[in-house]
Amino acid sequence: MSHLRLVPPVESAAFTWHGHRIAYEIHGDEGVPCVLIHGLLLDSLLNRELARRFVAEGYRVVLLDLLGHGRSDKPADPREHRIDFCAEQVVACLDHLGIDRALVGGVSLGAITALQVAALAEERCLGLFLEMPVMEWSTTFAALMFVPLIGAVDFAKPVVRAWSQLLGALPRPRSEWAASVMNLLSTPPEVITAVLHGILVGPVVPPARARRAMKLPALIIGHGSDRLHSLADAEALAAEMPDAKLLKARSLVELRLSPERMWPEIAAFLGRVRGVATARDAARRAS
C-alpha cells in the first residue's frame, strides 16, 4: 500500500457556489466518475487513500471539501451549513466538472450528504457508497453530544482559538487521515459552532419513504463500536433500500487502517457499478 501514497491528485481546484469557494481534488486520469465526501469537520485528506484504491478499480475520484471544511470557504453563519445544502454543493460540483452521473459516497456526514444527493437528483447517481450513516437511531445521541459542545466551544472561544492557531502552525504528519484530524482541531471556534448548529437546524436525512423509493445500487458500511454511528441505522437503511447491501466493519477505523478483509466485497460492488456505467455509455454511443 505504501506506493499508493506517493501518487498526488491529478487536479486540485475550486468552483463557486452561491458566492462561496468550494474546493475539490481529482484522483485518476480516467474511469467511472465518483465523488467521495469527508466526515464532520474533517476534509478531503481523510479519503485520499480510499480514492487511490477506487482509482485502481477503474474510477476517477473527486474529493470534495464541503463548505466550512478543508480548503473551502468557512462562513460562520449556521444557516449556510445545512446538510441539504451540502447535497446541493455535490450536484454543483458535478455540473462544474461536466459529469452527468457518478457514484456518490462518503463517511458519516459524507454518507448522509450522499443520501440527500440521491433524494435531490437520483438521476445524477450511479450508486451510493455509504460508510457509517448517521440517521434516526443516532440523532438523539448526536444532539446530546453536539449541543453541549457548541456551548463549550462558544464559552471557551479564546482558549479554543489559541489552541487552533497553535495546531494550525504545526507541520502535518505523513498520515493523511491524521493530518485531516489535525486540520479539524485547527478549525476556528466560530466555524465549529456554525457547522454543528447548521447540521442541527436543517434536515439530516431524507424520510424513510424516500429512501425506500431509491432504486440505486448501494453498499452500506456500519459497525457497532460507537453510538454516533449506530449499527441500527446502517441495518435499517440496508433493509429500506431495494438494492442495498450491508457490510459490517469491525471498528470505526477498519476501512482506514486495515481494509483488506472488507475490500473484496467493496471491489465487487465497485465492479458492478462500473459495469452498469460502461454498458450505459456503450448504449449511448450506439444510439
Image: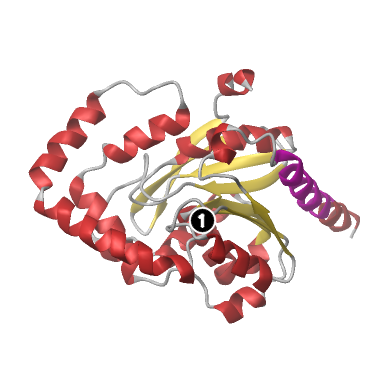
In the depicted structure, whether residue 120 falls above or below residue 188: below
**Residue 55 on image: x %, y %:** 68, 35
- Residue at which label 1 appears: 90
Dot 1 crowding, Cα within 10 Å, few <14, some 14–19, many 20+? many
The residue positioned 56% from the left and 47% from the top of the image is 36
The residue positioned 75% from the left and 38% from the top of the image is 58
Q: Is residue 180 left or right of residue 269?
A: left
**Residue 123 on image: x %, y %:** 67, 66
In the depicted structure, whether residue 172 falls above or below residue 287: above
Is 269 magenta? The answer is yes
Q: Give the residues drawn in magenta, as a range.
A: 263-278
The residue most toward the right is 286
**Residue 174 on image: x %, y %:** 44, 21
The colour scheme is secondary structure
Residue 160 in which image quadrant: top left
Q: Judge by depth and name the residue closer to the eye, 120 or 40.
A: 40
Is 74 magenta? The answer is no
Examine the residues drawn in magenta and state their main secondary structure. helix
Residue 166 visible within the image = yes
Under mark 1, the amino acid is Val
In the depicted structure, whether residue 65 falls above or below residue 127: above
Q: Is residue 77 left or right of residue 43?
A: left
